[in-house]
Amino acid sequence: MYDMKALYEARSVDHAIRLLQEHPQAQIIAGGSDVLVQMREGKRAGAELVSIYGLDELRGVSMEEDGTIRIGPLTSFSHITRDPLIRKYIGVLGEAVDMVGGPQIRNIGTIGGNTCNGVTSADSASTLFAWDAVIELTGPEGVRRIPIRDFYIRAGKVDLRPAEIQTGILIRRESYEGYQGHYIKYAMRNAMDIATLGCSVNVKLSDDRKTFTDIRIAYGVAGPVPMRAVHAEAAGKGLPVTEDSIEKISSTVLEDVTPRDSWRASKAFREHISKVLCKRALEEAVKRAESGTEQEIEREEKADIRAGVSADAEKSFSGESGRYKLIRCRINGVDREAVVDVRASLTDMLRNDYSLTSVKKGCEVGECGACNVIIDGECYNSCIYLAVWADGKEIRTLEGLMGPNGELSDIQQAFIDEAAVQCGFCTPGVIMSAVEILERGKEYTRDELRKMLSGHLCRCTGYENILNAVEKTMRKRLEKNSV
């Protein structure tokens, strides 16, 4: 149960603005991967929240008549990575957000939340800086648009006025046409970690591919807010595309970056890797520009099957702030109807109301993956997913995998055969991620499987046996389907 004073659910952008005016101390919650974690830590304890999670009008990617790419702020990282427009025109953004957290976090985390929290380490932010993105904000006074560089004011502070919400991220045609880019994240771990430093580079070459016509270099964690390396950009424009030029540009970034000492890395180390990452990103961007295409992001295309908030779910019960709410959903193939406390997580509901104890309570901040369930075909950490958001959804837990007489599914049996079950605490969540992977019906390399399972922590460190079980089941299913 989360320590919140009240939760108000917006039915439209106008309604959200009105709720923020009526409750001036209320804070916006989108995906919740930051807000709910901070509430659990006590930083936002007792807060009033205005949920915009149900506003499907703020999801998705589209292209306007003038070629501007519009990204809805509620678009999840995983959907950005898979979106055809992103892949075709600004694939590096999809690559950048594919490095956020783990798979479950990328399914719930939104690009609007990632930019509005104001942190310099946001993986999307430096890449959006490199694309000269424009932020669209809507509030009581109407709509305004500001360059992303002006949106960030200081660490943890962005230019959101009272009762305003972000309603779009815009990338104009002239900002992406003819450019190729690359993003590099330096972190201590390959998943579930924030950047020690991030560098995003876009280049535009001359028609003969021999001269830098334009260069954009942006950093995260090189200063209190994401930033552009303007001196390095100016130094590179017009230079020939040579190793010496790339070396000169990379060295010049030291005139721009202002990193600090922290427990993650010293200032001197961050200055060093600022040069190294810039050089590597430039080299890769040039390769892509010379070939004329973005590298394909190897993530499968999958339709966005999220459902909107139903009219019935807007009924609130008992209390001025709508403390209780009626929701209807399907759990393991059975239609369910329940009145839930708006402070409850989906973990609370599944365990307490339906005795689905395969959904474990572990970290409760979205890091360990023990509470992982499948919602509308995608994996989510149920500890940072509000129970009220389950309205209209189809939810699957480990209990739903077994046959009518308790028969184990093939992936469960594989975990036994490969000794992938040790203490068993993480096992249900890992198996549900494996189910999502296997149901795609595709063949993956071991490294790809490792990344897809990276949102789980196994306290017994049985990762190799887990990989063996998933890989074995994948191959058996593929062989069976090929017959």
Image (cartoon, grey):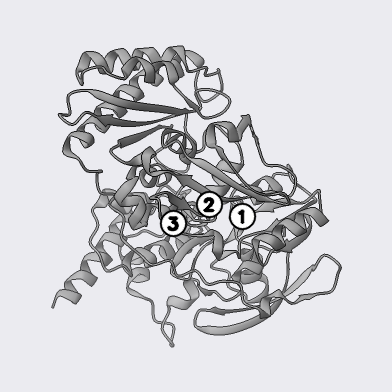
- Cα–Cα gap, marks 3 and 2: 13 Å
Q: In the rendering, at what x and y percent does residue 336 appear?
A: 61, 83
366 lies left or right of 469? right
Q: SS of the residue at dot 2?
A: loop
The amino acid at mark 3 is Val
- Tell me the crowding category of disc 1: few under 14, some 14 to 19, or many 20 or more residues within 10 angstroms, Cα based: many
Q: Residue at x 59, y 35 (%)?
A: 151
* Residue sitting at x 25%, y 43%: 294
Q: Amino acid at mark 1?
A: Ala
User: Is 247 positioned to the left or the right of 67 in the image?
Assistant: left
Residue 110 marker: 2
Query: In the image, is 391 to the left or to the right of 133?
Result: right
Residue at the extreme bottom: 404
Q: Which residue is label 1 attached to?
A: 30
- Say what secondary structure mark 1 lies in: loop
Quadrant including the N terminus: bottom right
Residue 269, image x and y in percent?
44, 16
Q: Quadrant of the C terminus?
A: bottom left
Q: CA distance from mark 3 to mark 1?
A: 17 Å
Q: Name the amino acid type tagged 2.
A: Thr
Q: Mark 2 or mark 1: name the one nearer the start of the chain.
A: 1
Nearer to us of marks 3 and 1 is 3
- Tell which circle, 3 or 1, labels the residue nearer the N-terminal end: 1
Q: Which residue is mark 3?
A: 61
Q: Residues within 10 Å of mark 3 (few under 14, many from 20)?
A: many
Q: Is there a contact, CB below 8 Å, between mark 2 and mark 1?
A: yes
